Image (cartoon, rainbow, N blue to C red):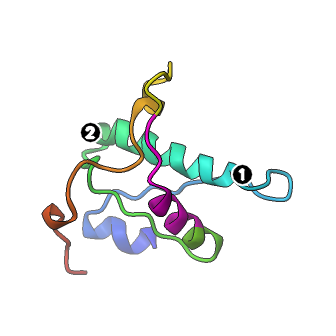
Amino acid sequence: MADFLAPAGYAVFSVNYRLAPKYPYPYMVYDVQRAVRYIRYHAHDWNADPDKIALVGGSAGGYLSNLVGLLNAPGDPHAADPVDLRERKGTGSRKSLRTKQL
């Protein structure tokens, strides 16, 4: 997927997460949520828009992408780490998102 999206101008990130059975649910969800927060926090370092992030994946990655989107986890206002202060979701509305024809 990255081989297709990166040449089209998209910033692509591959997210690793802890696996069951050693790390049972919900640890893998926490890992993906943290990754999204990290990407949003550092987006401008990579010339990316923190409010325009899409999660895609196959099999377990597809499930986690959908679950993280549905959970809509807020940031932690008491976190010492600035990444964890960020909300998982962006502030932009869906109507403001523009898609590229691939």
Q: In this view, does 57 lie above or below 15?
A: below
Residue at image point 30% right, 37% down: 45
From the image, tell me which residue sits under label 2. 44
Residue at image point 36% right, 43% down: 40
Instruction: Pinpoint residue 56: horizontal percent, then vertical percent.
Output: 46, 69
Q: Which three-letter amino acid code belongs to the residue tagged 1?
A: Arg
Q: Nearer the viewer, residue 40 or 92?
A: 92
Q: Does the magenta stretch include residue 7?
A: no
Q: Which three-letter amino acid code belongs to the residue tagged 2?
A: His
Crowd band around label 1 with a 10 angstrom C-alpha radius: few (<14), some (14–19), many (20+):
some
Q: Which of 101 and 34 is in front in this view?
A: 34
Q: Is residue 74 magenta?
A: yes
Q: Is residue 6 left or right of residue 95?
A: right
From the image, tell me which residue sits under label 1. 18
Please state the extent of the stretch shown in magenta in the rendering: 64-75
Q: Is mark 1 on a helix, strand or loop?
A: loop
Q: In which quarter of the image is residue 38?
A: top left
Which quarter shows the C terminus? Answer: bottom left
Q: Is residue 56 above or below residue 78?
A: below
Residue at image point 52% right, 48% down: 33
